[in-house]
Image (tube, rainbow, N blue to C red):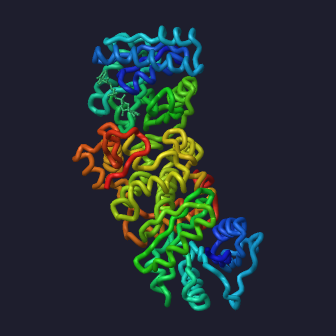
Amino acid sequence: MMEKHIWILGDSPLVEEYTALFVQHEFETRVRINPEGAVSRVPLGARQFVESEQITSAVLELTALSQETKRKNLVLLDDIVPFHIPILSASVTATVAEQASWLKYPSRLIGIGAFPTLLDSGTIELVQSPTTGNPARVAAEQLVAMLEMHVALVEDSVGLVMPRILCSLINEACFALAEQLAEPEDIDTAMKLGTNYPCGPFEWAERIGAKHVLAVMKALHRFYEEDRYRSAPLLQMAALRNMSLRKMNG
Amino acid sequence: MIKSIGIVGAGTMGSGIAEVAALAGIATVLTDTSEPTLTAARERIAQSIKRAVGKKRVSASEAEEANARITLTPSLADLTACDLVVEAIIEDEQVKRDLFRQLDRMLAPHAILGSNTSSLSITALASATQRPDKVVGIHFFNPVPLMKLVEVVQGRHTSNDTALEAFELAQRLGKTAVLCKDTPGFIVNRIARPFYGEALRLLGEGVASAEQIDYIVKTEGGFKMGPFELMDLIGIDVNYAVTKSVYEQFAHEPRFRPHAIQKQMVDAGTLGRKAGRGFFDYAGAGPNPPKAQS
Ligand SMILES: NC(=O)c1ccc[n+]([C@@H]2O[C@H](COP(=O)([O-])OP(=O)(O)OC[C@H]3O[C@@H](n4cnc5c(N)ncnc54)[C@H](O)[C@@H]3O)[C@@H](O)[C@H]2O)c1
């Protein structure tokens, strides 16, 4: 069994969500929130991440918004963490293959479908790229099991399964809202009652944050180079202004 | 205030609308060009109301009164006195336009013309009449007695009064009404497109199997059904037709582009549950849990 030590780096609110989960499962948890995303202190029950202390069983890199910061974090970790320690990297906005190309020890890198709000559920998506070694996959699976969650192993692709579907729905709802198809509350109601969705697109967007939804759409657009993934102007405006999508129309 | 409703088309949707209208205490006239369909509709409505009595949602006397409130007739002329007529006939613009033209000549000037269309433009249907301000989309969901939503669709010329009357009527029928503009797919059939479209692309690119995608969508996203199970239930032909229609009406907007997998499944006749096989295999085994195709 893996020792219960974990390092977690990245943006809010993912770092808080994952930290809470690891602390709850009695992991010795060390944390660092990216400087540009520092809206909160070190989450409860965790300690500050110290670069000189190199004892951990696994590392979680959860940066989703800035590729540059993600790269910096991964390169740093690759340098200071012994090469046999697996690095689980949030891979919703960049493929594992791309991230692996930044590292000296790429086989320890495995993707994780870390995305705001999706941790409330019982399943975590893991991404094994051709670059990912089996030991890293086995360790990641063990880690998810220790959190009493299920693994869904998917192939390397931007957006993975749930974030890609969810963000595309929200993006479409943003186009519709800009066209004043209906009131945002009515769009939410219609999707819940007309097709049994657990939440309406704007309710989801509220919980996820427009910035994170936009980051996924931008990543899909960059990866596929297709118009299909163009982000709705309304979504871009909401993310820029840090505003609720529901307040963006009219 | 709407006192009597006429419904044209006694199929799946029309008979459901007649049932909820009669249960709400409104005099209802249901017509269809096919006599056997009318007979079947009478039976289906009676059975459905009986089930509601069994579940204690309706009392025995209410059930009896509701059944008595429905007049079934093969003659369109029997709808002349209705305050509102909803059409739920075949999804064909020309046939619906012809019907609206006929109804427009027959009905009292105050009467409202509603369409249950899922994909046609209300504005286009309204242009067949001399009363485009009184034409409105009243889009129910299947099965009508169970699904709470009604989209009230305001065409280019639909007056606010007409939209409001349709809205209030939906509420009287015990539904939650939402008002929307006349654009392809209205709200639900449009915003749900990526749910299927992205799932199909994920499958096509080999990111995950249909079974895995459904599992993830249900256990990670909290959806009651995964996109592939749901397409199998709706019918892959029906789902493909809706996608194509939305795509074409949006001038080939790439977000709505249909997927080749769907077309191939339609060509192969693997249409979902009704065919015994779709993305999953339903032959022999019970409906749950579906087995993935290899
Ligand atoms: N089935 C659904 O899930 C669903 C959901 C929402 C809306 N709709 C829409 O509702 C409408 C009806 O769909 P349905 O599934 O009930 O179809 P259906 O085939 O079950 O019923 C249509 C009925 O209309 C009758 N009909 C055809 N032309 C007619 C005419 N000129 N005059 C009188 N009767 C005529 C047919 O005999 C048939 O009984 C369509 O516009 C469809 O798009 C369907």
Nearer to the camera, B88 or A23:
A23
* Residue located at (53% from left, 65% from top): A214
Left or right of B65 on screen, residue A154: left
Residue A64 vs residue B136, the one in the foreground: A64
Nearer to the camera, A239 or B147: B147
Q: Quadrant of residue A57?
A: bottom right
Q: Residue at x 37, y 31 (%)?
A: B126
Q: Would you say residue B249 is visible in this rendering?
A: no
Could you tell me residue A66's position as x and y percent? 56, 77
Q: As drawn, which residue projects farthest toward the front?
A: A1
Is residue B83 shown above or below A158?
A: above
Total labels: the figure holds: 0
Image side of residue A2 versus residue B239, left or right: right
Quarter of the figure with the C terminus of chain B: bottom left
- In the image, residue A148 sits, relative to residue B23, either above or below, namely below
Name the residue at 27% across, 31% down.
Answer: B94
The answer to whether B123 is drawn above or below residue B38 in the figure is below
Do we see residue B273 in this rendering? yes
* Residue B285, image x, y percentages: 37, 40
- Split into quadrants, the picture shows ligand 1 in the one at top left
Taking A196 as reference, is B80 above or below it?
above
Q: Position of residue A164 (x, y in %)?
A: 47, 61
Q: Residue furthest left?
A: B267
Q: Position of residue B95 (x, y in %)?
A: 27, 28
Is the N terminus of chain B in the top left, top right, bottom left or bottom right quadrant?
top right
